[in-house]
Image: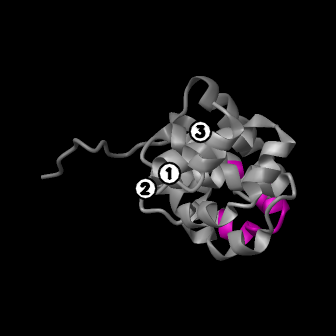
Amino acid sequence: MKREELISLLEYQDDALASRAWYDISSSGDRDLLSMAAAHVGKLLAILSSNSLQSRCYAWASAARLLEAGLISPDPLRQLKGFLLELLVKAPSTGLKVMAWSTVPALLQRGVLSKDDVRPFSDAAWKTLDLASGDDKALMRSTVDRLLQLDAISRRSPFSSVRVLDSDTVIL
């Protein structure tokens, strides 16, 4: 796809398509393409609070990359951080939770999130690590290690992996 076509997708009304275009561009490593995309950052900021949790996940991953590249300021992201924190527990799949969690170290280091924002979600981080598999497991393990180094999550409780009741259990 040509650069101009990809850039035009950034402003697309469909958040799913626009967020995927943002994700592809932010993953490209093409500095010129990233600079062109930065002119459309208003749409990305709107998707960060989208009702579509999947679109929101892709948008936050893109925003973290743009922040690392110095193409977006932490200030507007800080105002929307609650929408990312919600994804850490409510993303519709383990893979999307891993994607959301993988943005957290960069956002912590750049002042978008604080340790106090993230620490209440420690159990969710460990649960996501337990549920992840394959490449997602490796990415989540790396993310958890980084979050522990940053002292942003608690160490695993000895009781956190004990499952007392299954969702199909009935107590009479």
> Considering depth in this image, is 19 or 61 the residue closer to the camera?
19
Q: Which mark is residue 124?
A: none
Tag 1 residue: 55
For the residues carrying marks 2 and 3, which lies nearer the camera in this image?
Answer: 2
Q: Which mark is residue 129?
A: 3
Q: Is residue 23 visible?
A: no
Q: Which residues make up the magenta segment?
A: 103-118
Which residue shows up at 86% across the image and 52% down it? 69
Tag 2 residue: 52
Q: Is residue 164 visible?
A: yes
Q: Position of residue 23 (x, y in %)?
A: 64, 43
Mark before the other along the chain sequence, 1 or 3? 1
Tags 1 and 2 in contact by the CB under 8 Å rule? yes
Mark before the other along the chain sequence, 2 or 3? 2
Q: Is residue 57 left or right of residue 61?
A: left
Q: Is residue 105 left or right of residue 132?
A: right
> Considering depth in this image, is 54 or 97 the residue closer to the camera?
54
